[in-house]
Image (tube, rainbow, N blue to C red):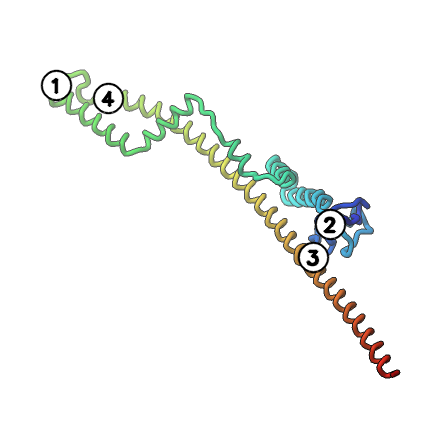
Amino acid sequence: MENFVSAISGQEFPVEQRILGASIRQPIFKLIKKEYPSFSKDKYIAATELMKYKEAYIAEFLKDEFGQLSQLDQQVIDSFRENRVISASLDGDNKECLTLGERVADKVAEFGGSWTFIISFMLFLVVWIAANIYWLNNKGFDPYPFILLNLILSCVAALQAPVIMMSQNRQEDKDRERARNDYVVNLKAELEIRELHEKIDHLIIRKEQELVEVQRDQVEKLGFLLKKMEKIEEAFKDK
């Protein structure tokens, strides 16, 4: 297997990992130059060595933007280093284990905010009022002005409001978690796009170098053929 020597570490790496300094983005190139002043754009570095400087650049970029590295930023950097899909770990973190109270709150909020609840509650009120006024001649268990009914309505409202608020608070937590996940995925996507641009640039520069080497080889062969032709012409002239 053909190898090359890294300009910064002096170690040998497979030629497939060879990256020209000119193909490295300027901010990352400056980080390498800061640590190794002798490194230049016409020298080579290994892809595994370059990854360390990419991580340092990403961390520095996030610190400049937000002042410090948050747990989310560190999570993105770790996933970038390990080359793993970050959405898979987020899906695993989102598995909820709801308590009985949370499940009840969700069901109450779901039922209390539906037309089923409104219609059934209106029917209950109509039946209650009709039973006391018409069937029991306003002498039943709750005659007009329906004091017991008012007490029941007050108790339902008093209990329903905090239960619905519990469900809403949990929904807000879900929204915050969703926003957090969106931020992490978007940040990882941005870094991956930057990495993809860099790889494309490196591929283009590498292909250009290969073309230049092919052209140089062709020019050398052409020069060799011209010299041979000149010698043959001289030989014919001597005859």
Q: Nearer the viewer, residue 190 or 123?
A: 190
Distance from the alpha carbon under mark 3 to that under mark 2: 12 Å
Give the left or right position of residue 208, taking residue 155 as reference: right
User: Which one is closest to the eye, mark 3 or mark 1?
Assistant: 3
Say which label, 3 or 4, has the lower sequence index.
Answer: 4
Say which label, 3 or 2, has the lower sequence index.
Answer: 2
Q: Which residue is at 42% across, 31% downward?
A: 168
Give the left or right position of residue 129, taking residue 225 as reference: left
Q: Which residue is at 80% across, 70% downward?
A: 224
Distance from the alpha carbon under mark 3 to that under mark 1: 96 Å
The residue under label 3 is 206
Q: Nearer the viewer, residue 48 or 55?
A: 48
Mark 1, secondary structure of its residue: loop
Q: Which residue is at 36% across, 27% downward?
A: 107
The residue under label 4 is 149
The amino acid type of the residue labelled 2 equals Val
The residue under label 1 is 136
The residue under label 2 is 15
Distance from the alpha carbon under mark 4 to that under mark 1: 16 Å
Distance from the alpha carbon under mark 3 to that under mark 4: 83 Å
Distance from the alpha carbon under mark 4 to that under mark 2: 85 Å
Q: Where does the image place residue 113, in percent across and percent down from the top left?
A: 33, 32
Q: Where does the image place residue 52, in percent across and percent down from the top left?
A: 71, 42
Find residue 166 and name its label. none
166 w.r.t. 6: above or below: above
Q: Where does the image place residue 219, in percent across and percent down from the top left?
A: 76, 69
Give the left or right position of residue 95, taking residue 219 as reference: left
Say which label, 4 or 2, has the lower sequence index.
Answer: 2
Sort mark 4 into few (<14), some (14-19) or many (20+) by Cα contacts within 10 Å.
some
The amino acid type of the residue labelled 1 equals Leu
Mark 3, secondary structure of its residue: helix
User: Which one is closest to the eye, mark 3 or mark 4?
Assistant: 3
